[in-house]
Image (cartoon, coloured by chain):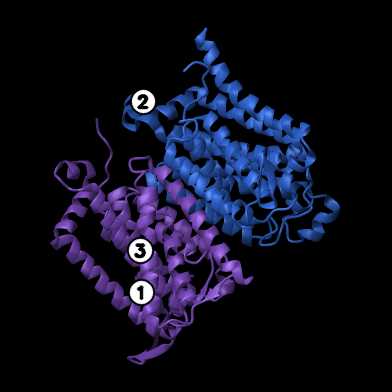
Chain colours: A purple, B blue
Amino acid sequence: MTAAILGSVDAQTLADAVGLGAVYALMAVGIGLVFGVLRLVNFAYGQLIMAGAYTLAFTTHWPVVWSIVACFVVVVALSLVMDRALFRPLRGASPAVMLVATFAIAFMLQAIAQLVDIRDNTIGEIATSIAPLNRPTTVLGVEVRKITIVAVLVTAVVLALLALLLMRTTIGLHMRAAATDFRTARLLGVRANSVIAFAVLLSGLLAAIVSVMLTVQFPFVTPDFALRDTIVVLVGVVVGGIDRLWTATLGGFAIGFTTGVINGALPTEQTVFLPSAVFALVILVLLIRPAGLFAGGRTTVERV
Amino acid sequence: MRRYLDPLVQLLAPVVLVLAVGVGSTLFSSSNEIYVLNALVSVAIVVAIYVFVGNSGVLSFGQISFVAVGAFTAGVMTIPLESKAGVLPQLFPLLGEHTVGNVASLVLGAGAGGVFALIVGLPLMRLSGLAAGIATFAVLEVTHNILREWTKIGPGATTLSLVPETTDSLQATIGALLVVTAAFVYQRSRFGRRLRASREDPAAARGVGVDVHRERLWAFVVSGALAGFGGGLLVHLLGSITTEQVYLELTFLTLAMLVIGGLTSLWGAVVGALAVSGLHSFLVEAEQGVDVGVSLDLPQGTRLIFLGGIMALVLIVRPSGLTGGREFRLIR
């Protein structure tokens, strides 16, 4: 089967796969940043992206720039509200409780979207204003969709800026300290609330960027928009190694790239059992490297 | 005296609660019966999940796989022979040419769930934390994918229909009681106690000689068998089922029930399942307009918003669940 996949991979498929990997990498960073400071897996991250996509769809007759600004405002505001209303009261609760609380919020946001969407008696809204970015252009003799180039460039710039922020600024230092050991960081004068709020803000900005890029590629917005992507990215993040931001990002990219290559290369009638193969591989990787594929060989077994 | 009284009370409290709900369904009007049956089957499934997740402290998103396997085993094996070849023409001969009775199908469902859990659990139980969560989730994905595409063992992507609807209030009550009792016996046994010790402090439990891997595997298999049994009850309640009904949404909902009730106690699992089922039924009725002292009429489509919102609110107010994760006690 490997040969069949490799045989039919062309440059265009590879370009699309890199584009998808770039988008998933940004989602992985968004999820990883919040996990770093809160130890919380935000299952409702996809619903932030969904809210952004709906904003783009509802403002599709606005000038494109304003439509995108509106998307950013809505997503960032929603993510800050989520932090204040849900994450803060649950700080210090067990991981299972925090995860289930984000399920509940995801559930609620999806139901709200359904209710807003159904007003015109049809499910789904179309965002057309930014769709032209999905058209192909020719780079070095290869047909590539413009959004792929945009996605790769934006991801590269964002990751570079984020690296600068984390390594060169005070708030970045505080965030890294908090991610390593929150209690000690607080004892040394790191302000918990501002570090967490900043991480959530960044994570919201990333979600907004992702909603623009996903909506360009999938202009038909439904209440479960980005739900499947979020689940796949969560899997990728844990497989890559959730304890560190760069391994999580790499995991997100890897699973996006793999999905892209496989979907592009195989005809659909051959892919019915493909999800099983992919998830069996996930299990295998986790069994061999429970801390993550890219996390190095260290295992932390507590010794008394 | 307390030595015998406390465990007795701990078993009797959930049993009495389940009985009250089950008997209550026959006393009230039959229009509410479906809600009660749903709630009782939810109790069976949530308690099955509790046996592993609650006792081991390892989060699993995979237990609904065993519900699915149990449901499709029990369902496929009880479709009447004369219609089986028509609705499921591609079945393996062994499955296509035999049909069993209702009780036997529940036993088969439990067996299939248990065996599947053993196969899956053998490698997976070495994992902890998020890795275990994602790996068990991968099991759910694989199970769903195979059930959906392999038409030799079931209906594939179409609906499995013509399953006898035998889960009435008597069967649902007895089924839920059986699962609760099995969970209680397990958690009082030395296996259950060793596993709970490893939940509280893995290093210390290892230090006194607990084989954490083996104890988790035991719980996983018991949980898988009970979940398969719960799946059997579910399919005989619905009469027809698709793979989508035993997939993500049921996984999230049942886990939410467990956490809202209180992750670490049997009492919590039962209370959570009944409370969330009850709330959901109430909201469904409220959308039609219901009279509770004052007339309450929610706009159409708002029930899931309220369900999600109230679940989040309960967790904010009581992060350790409605029961605080403790068993029922008469004297605090």
| Residue to which mark 2 is pinned | B209
Discs 1 and 3 share one subunit = yes
Kindly indicate whether the residue at mark 1 contacts the one at mark 2 (C-beta within 8 angstroms).
no
Judging from the image, mark 3 belongs to the subunit labelled: A
Residue B155 lies, with reference to residue B50, above or below; the image says: below
* Foreground tag (3 vs 2): 3
Which of A61/B229 is in front? Answer: A61
Dot 3 lies on which element? helix
Tell me if A25 is positioned left or right of A178 in this view: right
Which residue sits at x=55%, y=48%?
B307
* Foreground tag (2 vs 1): 1
Which residue sits at x=45%, y=61%?
A47
Judging from the image, mark 2 belongs to the subunit labelled: B
Rendering quarter of residue B43:
top right
Tell me if B72 is positioned left or right of B78 in this view: left
Discs 3 and 2 share one subunit = no
Q: Could you say which disc has been placed on residue A76 in the image?
A: 3
Judging from the image, mark 1 belongs to the subunit labelled: A
Rendering quarter of residue A79:
bottom left
**Amino acid on which the number 3 mark rests in the picture:** Val
Q: Could you say which disc has been placed on residue A69 in the image?
A: 1
